[in-house]
Amino acid sequence: MARVRRPVVITGTGTACGFGVGTDALWSGLCEGRSAIGPVRAFDASGFRCTQAAEVPEGFDIRQLVPKSYRKATKVMARDIELAVAAADAAVREAGLVTKGIAEGEAPTIPPNRFGCHIGAGLIACDVDELTAALVTAKSASGAFDSGAWGHTGMTNLTPLWLLKYLPNMLSCHVTIIHDCQGPSNTITCAEASGLLSMGESMRTIERGAADACLAGGAESKINPMGLLRQQFADRLCALPPEASASSAVRPYASDADGSILGEGGGLVILEAEESARARGATIRARVAGFAAGQCSCDDTVGVDLSAAGEDIAATMLAALRDAGLESSAMDAIVPMASGIPSTDAAERAAFAAVFGERATTIPIVTMMGAIGNCGAGVGALQLAVAVRCLEHQLLPARLGGPEAGGLQAHAAPSSAAALGHLMVVSAGLGGQVAVVILGRAA
């Protein structure tokens, strides 16, 4: 018996990144060929290999993006949670939905028990000052850290709600409370693949009739000492001193690629059953044609380098094409990680060759990390939001980087008009998880 699948569409996108809050800010920055990367403001990064990052602009205040009745809860929001909440607010508004978080007391557009939420999260790093203020009270007589003292007195110097700021599921927790999403909800923590994996779960939830709409995506801030240190130890960062220009620092697929740059950001989209969207007269921005997830073999369990043959990424790309009922020739552009990390780039390049053959050197590639950095669990959803705008505007945004990209169409270039019917979005995360989404242009 054939599986019955409800058609799923995207009716809203929301992002928060180095260009600001809202997908229009991200889209404008990319199309204009700007970079949001600059010297790290959050802390002194002078001792790191890469001293620049893409941070949300100064003046960002999450209290202005939640209902007044919820502002007290912002005290227990880590930066990652703030990014997710901001992206959700922008996505809900763009979709034209009424929720408790947008208009408290009004009837919601989607019944709460039919509104789900799946958000990807990363390893939320604790606030250094907050943690060390407690750690310093757990010393032995010699001045060394004493684990016994930490368990007896040190921990009591943390705020009682301290842990609620750093649990990965708190991104979905706050978003679902604010917008009263009572449908299926989950958190996925698979590094850069988290956002697309979450979107895939939302898609399947709607397809099988368990919800009519879902908020889906991911968010993460790696702009903290621990986040930067982890990436440096994994050998994923380029060398970038404070005075250097970031516009060509990330060079995807180039022979001289040196690594990536970190960013903070998140993206959420409103996935909706097509009949629900049409019934309420919503603007359908894109169709979700196919999805697939896979796991790459990683030869290096320290740096977690992906297999250079890219066979697992290619298999996932082909599975997504089968899910969409399309051939690779139907794809008009790719929106991949394009991170500038040599090992990840090599795996992606091999996968493109396996799936697209000779066409791999001519198919347009949309790149983003040179403008907004590697936003971890937020990467996939940011890619997805940009892909939606590409389809809406029939436009490929400008690319930053170097003059060559190993023969691929990923070198520095200005924005250009393009006939776009389908795009393939690909995310392969640190650890080997991979997710692929195929979007189609709205009718």
Image: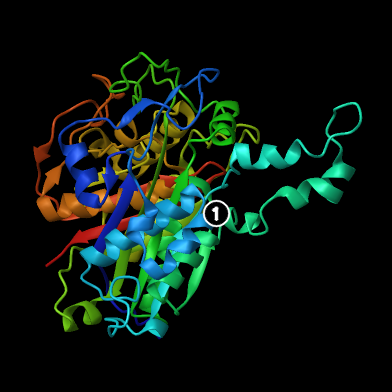
In the image, residue 103 above or below residue 82: below
Residue 46 versus residue 104: which sits nearer the camera?
104
| x and y, in percent, of residue 269 in the image | 31, 61
Q: Quadrant of the C terminus?
A: bottom left
Rendered residue at 55%/25% (across/down): 235
In the image, residue 394 above or below residue 368: below
Q: Quadrant of the N terminus?
A: bottom left
Q: Is residue 287 visible?
A: no
- Which residue position holds label 1? 189
- Label count reads 1
In the image, residue 388 above or below residue 375: below
Q: Count neighbours of disc 1 (C-alpha within 10 A) and say few if under 14, some if 14 to 19, many if 20 or more.
A: some
Q: Is residue 398 visible?
A: yes
| x and y, in percent, of residue 433 in the image | 52, 49
Q: To which quarter of the image does residue 285 belong?
A: bottom left
Rendered residue at 59%/35% (across/down): 226
| Colour setup of the view | rainbow
Residue 400 versus residue 71: which sits nearer the camera?
71
Answer left or right for 419 relative to 275: left
Please state which amino acid type lies under the numbered disc 1. Thr
Identity of the residue furthest to the right in this view = 141
| x and y, in percent, of residue 170 in the image | 53, 61
Answer left or right for 421 relative to 147: left
In the image, residue 103 above or below residue 23: below
Rendered residue at 16%/38% (across/down): 31
